[in-house]
Amino acid sequence: MKIAVDAMGGDYAPREIVKGSLDAAKEYGISVILAGDEERVYYELGGDNAGGLVSVVNAPEVVEMCEQPAAVIRKKKNSSIATVTRLVKEGEAQALVSAGSTGAAMASALLGLGRIKGIDRPAIASLLPAEKGFTVLLDAGANVDCKPHHLVQFGIMGYLYAMKILGVKNPRVGLLSNGEEETKGNETILAAFPLLQKAGINFFGNVEGRDLFRDTVDVLVCDGFVGNVVLKTVEGMATSIFKVIREETTRNRLARMGVVLAGPALKGLQKRIDYAEYGGAPLLGVNGISVISHGSSTGKAIKNAIKVAGQLVENRLVESIRDSIENANIYGAGDRHALGVN
Amino acid sequence: MKIAVDAMGGDYAPREIVKGSLDAAKEYGISVILAGDEERVYYELGGDNAGGLVSVVNAPEVVEMCEQPAAVIRKKKNSSIATVTRLVKEGEAQALVSAGSTGAAMASALLGLGRIKGIDRPAIASLLPAEKGFTVLLDAGANVDCKPHHLVQFGIMGYLYAMKILGVKNPRVGLLSNGEEETKGNETILAAFPLLQKAGINFFGNVEGRDLFRDTVDVLVCDGFVGNVVLKTVEGMATSIFKVIREETTRNRLARMGVVLAGPALKGLQKRIDYAEYGGAPLLGVNGISVISHGSSTGKAIKNAIKVAGQLVENRLVESIRDSIENANIYGAGDRHALGVN
């Protein structure tokens, strides 16, 4: 298996990207193709290539954060993001990983790999740590304005993701709303509810923000605006809580000692809410595997993103979505169908 | 000053409501009128009336959680929520507090007190603890579908709330979006942005979920669907974090000792994210003061909600909104105006 990695994307590129790629190759035996400014990438590799598992493709064009994503992909064919996408499209790699601009990664996947037939809007699927295991949140930011049937497509893709990648048997899919009752929701949610009931997945009904952390559902469906707000709220709260603990313990010696003793517990907590542990979020619904990593990804995050990409390839998630969506009842017309998986 | 309190609303009514009312009367010298099933309220009072500050009005009709809010208000005129609303409308009390159904409290305020002229959609304003002080989040759940000009009205009300109640000079008002740039947002957010720029308040621009906890803005505007999801996400995460800490420390004796030593720091943190500390969220935009408390309010939450209601009366927030909204430029027509406050 080969994973194409965007060596130039992210706040700590190329250093941390190269580091994470070497670690993934050594730890998981995955072949990695690094696309980026050759000279800088080789410098970071420092002569190491993980026993031949890591190779380099020169992609010297630089993408600026302010550039229009679609224009970048069309004009800068030798940028690192366009290059990793091309490697996947041409079958030289089975998946790509990028910590660069989310917009550019999305545009690149949409234009370069194309949508799976039957999927109108590819969605970003993020994993959030819950009390038991994880909750898949999608769309985590790809589509800010969604129609009810888009949410149904997200539900089907999330269902397959939780089953194939998290190993959940018949995953429970919830619709994120402002109350548990069927009558709760804005116009889009109210219209999506009956469609999800008929979509052939294990639809749980409406769930609330607090259910993200509980063992209520395995998949949480929302539009990309709400998903982005929720994700950044959780991230912000986690950062803020650890900052408060640090500040309080700096002022108080006993408390500081306490935190040292409570270390493993707090570390466990921190680990659970650290995005770097989960590496990256796949863009589901495109004809290929594209894993988008956090802009501030460290080597650890990249290593884990490469691992996630590998799991997506092995478990043939793209093929599953393709097969299931063809037969899916997305618009509420016709009868209940089976996804062929339940 | 007199505050009318719904003695029968909430999971722990009437016991905790009565307890909180007695405490508020004794601690802040506020007169409280308790509306509810006379017999049960007197039983809970146990002969105490805080030196004459607490009185009782009989309101025997019971509202069930499943009843349609508007129907309740029309038909059950002797329910506790209808009674406290009437007391405010008739001037016998200056504000009301209820921990009962949010829908019933809202319907009651809308039908009984009416909207302030110029406000189309009253909004619930919640306080969230930030790194320095608080962030006002509105709408926290009253309106699930909003038009751009509703968000402008929320911005103006939040601005006045932060200024009058939190004492912030020229509060910064942010629009909750999926990115900081002006180009980010769903259709409603994109349309609200230029209107907020012209609304005569200190509009900061778009902010993200993580800014809830930072010192970026004082007021965060969103629709009630997003507000509700964000609020419940924060609440759920706080509950989950303390549960994880408890579990981890039960397994590990050293960690348990650590948590005891770190106690003040963790307690400080818990206090900061405990909704009971803030008591209740006012429904802004109605002709009167209505403070909605959490359904699971304890005596402490009710005591604090009564305190908040008292501050709203003293600082004449309803009058401020009434004066400001009359001159406000909400629809983007005409020139920049001054709210008369900055």
Image (cartoon, coloured by chain):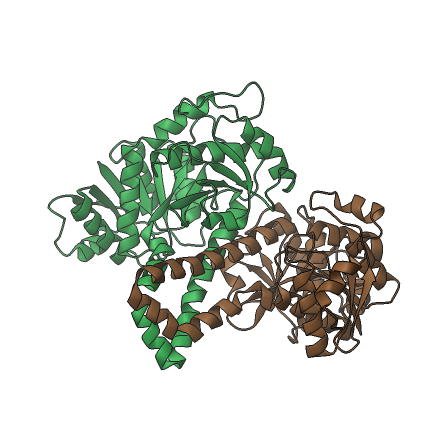
Chain colours: A brown, B green
**Residue drawn where x is 78% and y is 59% of the image:** A39
Q: Quadrant of the N terminus of chain A?
A: bottom right
Give left or right: position of A225 versus B31. right
Q: Left or right: where does residue A165 sit relative to residue A175?
A: right
Asked whether the viewer can see residue A196, the reply is yes
Quick one: which residue is furthest to the right in this view? A90
Residue A201 makes an appearance in the image = no
At x 18% / y 57%, what residue is drawn? B43
Q: Which residue, as the protein is rendered here, is positioned at the far top?
A: B334
What is the x, y in percent for residue A126?
63, 62
Left or right: residue B316 versus residue B125 is left
Q: Is residue B270 above or below residue B142?
A: below
* Residue A86: quadrant of the picture: bottom right
Residue A206 is left or right of residue B93, and the answer is right
Q: Nearer the viewer, residue B169 or A130?
A: B169
Above or below — where is B114 with respect to B262? above
Question: Which of the 4 image quarters holds residue A42?
Answer: bottom right
**Tag count:** 0
Q: Residue B97 falls in which quadrant of the image?
A: top left
Looking at the picture, tell me which residue is in the foreground, B230 or A283: A283
Asked if B101 appears above or below A313 in the picture, the reply is above
Question: Image quadrant for the C terminus of chain A?
Answer: bottom right
Percent coordinates x, y for residue A322 in the rendering: 81, 65
Residue at 68%, 48% (x, y): give it: A146
In percent of width and height, residue B31 lies at: 19, 41
The x and y percentages for residue B19 are 22, 55
Image: B315 above or below B309: above
